[in-house]
Image (spheres, rainbow, N blue to C red):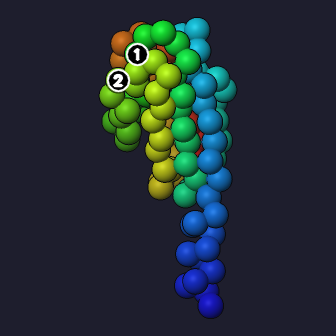
Amino acid sequence: MATSLAGFCEAAGTTYQVVIEQMRFDPPVLTVHRGDRVVWVNRDLFPHTVTGMSKAFDSHEISPNASWSYVARQTGRYRYLCTLHTTMRGTLIVQ
Ligand SMILES: [Cu+2]
């Protein structure tokens, strides 16, 4: 049963939300586990991106009121920014 149990754990991954609002990622630092999904929701009136500094992931432009989701497959500490407003920074930690 080990194989199917592993499959169950994968399917049961948690979904987390990061809100992009007023030029900030909230929460700025998020810790998840492998297999979890992270959804970034843009509540500003202009586009943003979620771009890993190591290029591990890149949302490209997320329109206002749109969202982008990413399933964390590899452990690590991923710092990311918005390429349109480079002072906007966040960190995704995958355990
Ligand atoms: Cu931005």
- Assess disc 2: are there few (<14), some (14-19) or many (≥20) residues with their C-alpha within 10 Å of its C-alpha: some
Q: Which structural element holds mark 2?
A: loop
Q: Is residue 72 above or below residue 26?
A: below
Q: Residues within 10 Å of mark 1 (few under 14, many from 20)?
A: some
Q: Position of residue 40 (x, y in %)?
A: 53, 32
The answer to whether one can see residue 56 in this image is yes
Q: Residue at x 52, y 12 (%)?
A: 44
Question: What mark, if any, has residue 47 been given in the picture?
Answer: 1
- Looking at the image, do the residues carrying marks 2 and 1 touch, with CB atoms under 8 Å apart? yes
- Is residue 49 shown left or right of residue 16? left
Task: Classify residue 90 as left or right of residue 32.
Answer: left
Q: Which residue is mark 2?
A: 61
Question: Is 17 placed above or below 82 here?
Answer: below
Specify the quadrant that holds the N terminus. Answer: bottom right
Q: Percent position (x, y) of residue 69?
A: 48, 41
**Residue at image location 64% in from the left, 64% down from the top:** 12
Instruction: State whether label 1 is within 8 Å of ligand 1.
Output: yes
Closer to the chain start, of discs 2 and 1, is 1
In this orientation, which residue lies closer to the viewer: 86 or 43? 43
**Residue depicted at 37% across the width and 32% down the height:** 59
Camera-side residue of 25 and 56: 25
Q: CA distance from mark 2 to mark 1?
A: 6 Å
**Residue 47: x and y, percent?**
40, 16
Give the residue drawn at x 56%, y 75%: 7
The one nearer the camera, 35 or 75, is 35
